[in-house]
Amino acid sequence: MAKAPFNPGSDRIFINAYIYNGKKDLKPPSFENKIENNGNMYLQKRLLWQSEPYTFDVIRWMCHIKATVNQVL
């Protein structure tokens, strides 16, 4: 496992949210652990690995859907 020191500070992260209605269990995500274009002919390489997890609070909004109206909050 490769590690490197980073300067302290704040991170800006972008999060995609996926909705899984009705699924009791979800399979864990899979990540690639490799380097693409890792030859002496390539100037740019693509490094792929699983990063450290970020902890964040989640607000769960619920809504009631009626047959006659799209959504009623």
Image: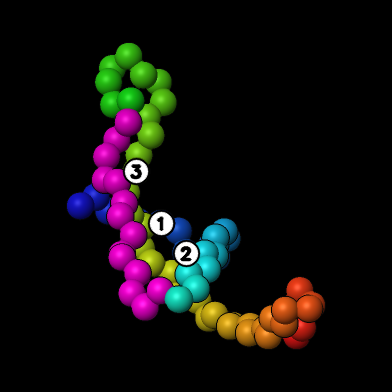
When the figure is inspected, residue 14 is found, relative to residue 34, above or below; the finding is below
Magenta run includes residue 25: yes
Q: Please tell me which residue is depicted at 50% across the width and 73% down the height of the picture.
A: 21
* Amino acid type of the residue that numbered disc 2 sits on in the rendered structure: Pro
Task: Out of 21 and 47, give the one closest to the viewer.
Answer: 21
Please name the residue shown 77% across and 83% down the image: 72
Nearer to the camera, 2 or 28: 28
Callout 1 amino acid? Phe
Q: Residues within 10 Å of mark 2 (few under 14, many from 20)?
A: few
Spatial CA span between label 3 and label 1: 18 Å
Pick the residue in front: 9 or 44.
44
Residue 73, quarter of picture: bottom right
Residue occupied by mark 1: 6
At a point 52% along the width and 64% down the height, the residue shown is: 18
From where the camera sits, is residue 9 visible?
no
User: What residue span does the magenta drawing correspond to?
Assistant: 23-36
Cα distance in 3D space between marks 3 and 2: 22 Å
Query: Mark 3 is on which residue type?
Result: Leu
Question: Mark 1: which secondary structure?
Answer: loop
Q: Can residue 69 be seen in this view?
A: yes
- Tag 3 residue: 48
Residue, disc 2: 8
**Mark 1 vs mark 2, CA separation in Å:** 6 Å
